[in-house]
Image (cartoon, grey):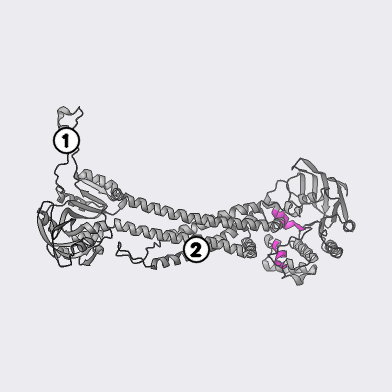
């Protein structure tokens, strides 16, 4: 058994506005290194809410969250930002690329922020990631000149740049056609096989989830299958 | 903190909306330009007007005022000491205007280290006799050299040589307008009559022009000796001592001190010319108010543009935060944008402000009132440039700070899920 990279201990979440509603009930699970996990469930079952808690962006919850064995509760905003930068890669339903920067710079940004390598080295790595995803030719274009599938691949490259502990995806194929969805899935699959990349993907695409290693199914804020 | 990265993000955001950024910067440039020009011009004008008066006014004037005595003989009588004494119809005594024992006063002033210089003076009323008509006038008997050293007498003598006053006996320098009225050319001899009825002929050796019409109509200058002769007084007769101090601000205190010490009347420049001080400070206040208002308006421009930028770039901010930029770093990006607009705009403002000042400085400004002035006065005090710079940085920082704070508080979850 390999090491645990992410662990959720009895996480509960309430929405306070307009009335107090509990949306997550006592969520307990853990993810090991190299696992390809998908979270599925119907709309409104709390899967995205859970993902944002796990990603440290949402801090308003009860229970404990461990990333790489470190408790995230009571960490400061700056520390959490650092964790996100270093250990988590994000792929969202929408690409969220910055149109002011070239594709290459977009991929480089989190790396430059981390500052572990020199700018040259980061550029080299970024080009390498783009090559893996087959879009190195678009490196100097602006994101708004790319197609939807290409944009999503750039977003994946950006998520990979700091070689994160875990990549989290919120419906990464939700906005793509079938062909591109499959392409993105294949990329994810390849990553788990080749680089032992841990993945946690929220989706309601059953076909997508069926092909992953492990499915966590949620309903009404509770895990019903894992 | 990764300064270079923050800088490149700020730069990219600015370039993405370069038109608005430019307009904001032009706003700052305009306000700083106006601030610097306005203050330079206003203060130039202030200095000019102040000098018109201050250069020619003694810091302290020692004299004997014609006034009723405060202590009446009855007050000195011991038997009436405990009673209220009412004396009606008190009149000033016929009065000697001269300063008693002025030699010792002058000696004391000479020893006083706070005094820059002093010049004795006699003032007397006269009539200029022009044919059958007598014009009212006043003659100032002066120590020509001391007067020139302390009050730049030479500058105001627009025709003739001021030193002739000392060299040529029985000479007079007439006020320009008085001279015009009398049709007195240089070299002519005019006749004056003293209040006591004595007549004397004086030779005109120059014209005097102060810029103040009322003065030029009445005043004229002669040497002390000539005036003493005119009045039939001895050589120790003087009516005024004009004192110039090293530090003008001490004038009110010293005036009181001298009044007690020499038992005479003393008036300081601040009391005598209070209106000029007030005028100057109010003009300065107004120009500061206008300048700062302009800057604040420019600040609102920056505030608006940054707010709009943040609203538009909500997604970008959210993703920056999701990928590991902290709120503080996002804040720095927007503060940096604000400051960049302020610094660049401000710098151009200083340059344009200087250029405008030079232009104004070279515009012809000829007025009969001020013969020595040919162009508009401008003050190039570095102080205004420094204040302008500081204000532009402070306002743009604040204008950047509040939108930046808002940006730093953006919750990425709400933005990313909201789509």
Question: Which segment did they paint magenta?
Answer: A81-109
* Residue A94 painted magenta: yes
Decide: is B276 above or below A137.
above
Percent coordinates x, y for residue A56 in the rendering: 74, 51
User: Which is nearer the eye, A212 or B155?
Assistant: B155
Vertical relation: B363 (above or below) B64: below
Horizontally, residue B302 falls left or right of residue A135, namely left
Does residue B113 appear to the left or right of B225 in the view shown?
right
Q: Please give the count of numbered marks on the rendered protein.
A: 2
- Image position of B335 (left or right of A56): left
Q: Residues within 10 Å of mark 2 (few under 14, many from 20)?
A: many
Residue B311: name its quadrant. Answer: bottom right
- The residue furthest bottom is A137
Residue under circle 2?
B349
Q: Which residue is mark 1?
A: B72
Q: Earlier in the sequence, mark 1 or mark 2?
A: 1
């Amino acid at each position: 058994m390999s090491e645990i990279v992410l662990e959720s201990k009895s996480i509960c979440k309430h929405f306070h506005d307009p009335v107090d509603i509990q949306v997550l009930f006592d969520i307990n699970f853990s993810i090991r290194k190299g696992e390809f996990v998908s979270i599925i469930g119907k709309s409104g079952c709390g899967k995205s809410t859970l993902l944002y808690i796990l990603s440290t962006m949402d801090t308003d919850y009860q229970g404990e969250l461990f990333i790489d064995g470190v408790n995230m509760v009571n960490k400061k905003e700056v520390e959490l930002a650092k964790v996100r930068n270093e250990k988590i890669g994000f792929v969202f339903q929408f690409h969220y690329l910055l149109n002011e920067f070239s594709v290459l710079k977009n991929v480089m940004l989190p790396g430059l922020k981390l500052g572990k390598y020199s700018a040259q080295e980061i550029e080299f790595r970024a080009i390498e990631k783009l090559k893996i995803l087959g879009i190195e030719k678009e490196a100097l274009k602006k994101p708004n000149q790319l197609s939807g599938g290409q944009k999503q691949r750039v977003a994946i490259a950006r998520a990979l740049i700091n070689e994160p502990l875990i990549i989290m995806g919120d419906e990464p194929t939700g906005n793509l056609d079938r062909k591109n969805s499959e392409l993105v899935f294949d990329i994810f699959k390849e990553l788990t096989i080749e680089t032992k990349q841990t993945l946690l993907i929220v989706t309601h695409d059953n076909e997508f989830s069926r092909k992953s290693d492990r499915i966590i199914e949620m309903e009404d804020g509770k895990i019903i299958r894992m | 903190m990764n300064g270079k990265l923050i800088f490149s993000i700020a730069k990219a955001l600015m370039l993405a909306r370069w038109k608005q950024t430019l307009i904001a910067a032009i706003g700052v440039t305009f306000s700083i330009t106006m601030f610097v020009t306005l203050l330079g011009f206003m203060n130039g004008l202030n200095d000019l007007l102040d000098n018109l008066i201050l250069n020619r006014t003694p810091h302290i004037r020692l004299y004997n005022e014609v006034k009723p005595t405060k202590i009446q003989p009855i007050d000195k009588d011991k038997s009436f000491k405990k009673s209220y004494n009412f004396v009606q119809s008190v009149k000033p005594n016929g009065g000697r205007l001269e300063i008693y024992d002025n030699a010792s006063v002058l000696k004391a002033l000479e020893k006083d280290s706070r005094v820059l210089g002093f010049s004795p003076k006699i003032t007397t009323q006269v009539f200029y006799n022009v044919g059958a008509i007598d014009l009212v006038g006043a003659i100032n008997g002066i120590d020509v050299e001391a007067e020139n050293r302390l009050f730049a007498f030479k500058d105001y003598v627009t025709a003739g040589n001021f030193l002739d006053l000392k060299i040529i006996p029985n000479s007079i320098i007439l006020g320009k307008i008085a001279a015009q009225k009398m049709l007195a050319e240089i070299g002519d001899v005019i006749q004056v009559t003293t209040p006591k009825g004595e007549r004397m002929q004086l030779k005109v050796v120059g014209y005097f022009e102060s810029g103040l019409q009322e003065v030029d109509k009445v005043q004229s200058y002669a040497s002390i000796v000539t005036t003493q002769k005119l009045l039939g007084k001895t050589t120790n007769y003087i009516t005024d001592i004009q004192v110039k101090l090293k530090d003008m601000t001490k004038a009110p205190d010293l005036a009181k001190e001298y009044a007690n010490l020499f038992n005479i009347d003393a008036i300081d420049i601040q009391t005598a010319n209070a209106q000029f001080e007030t005028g100057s400070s109010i003009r300065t206040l107004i120009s500061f108010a206008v300048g700062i208002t302009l800057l604040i308006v420019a600040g609102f421009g920056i505030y608006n543009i940054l707010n709009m930028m943040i609203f538009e770039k909500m997604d970008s901010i959210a993703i920056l935060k999701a990928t590991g930029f902290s709120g503080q770093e996002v804040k720095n990006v927007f503060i940096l944008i604000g400051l960049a607009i302020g610094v660049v705009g401000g710098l151009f403002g200083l340059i344009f402000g200087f250029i405008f000042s030079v232009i104004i400085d070279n515009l012809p400004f000829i007025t009969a009132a001020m013969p020595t002035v040919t162009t508009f006065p401008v003050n190039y005090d570095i102080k205004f440039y420094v204040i302008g710079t500081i204000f532009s940085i402070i306002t743009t920082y604040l204008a950047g700070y509040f939108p930046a704070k808002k940006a730093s508080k953006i919750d990425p979850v709400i933005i990313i899920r909201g789509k």
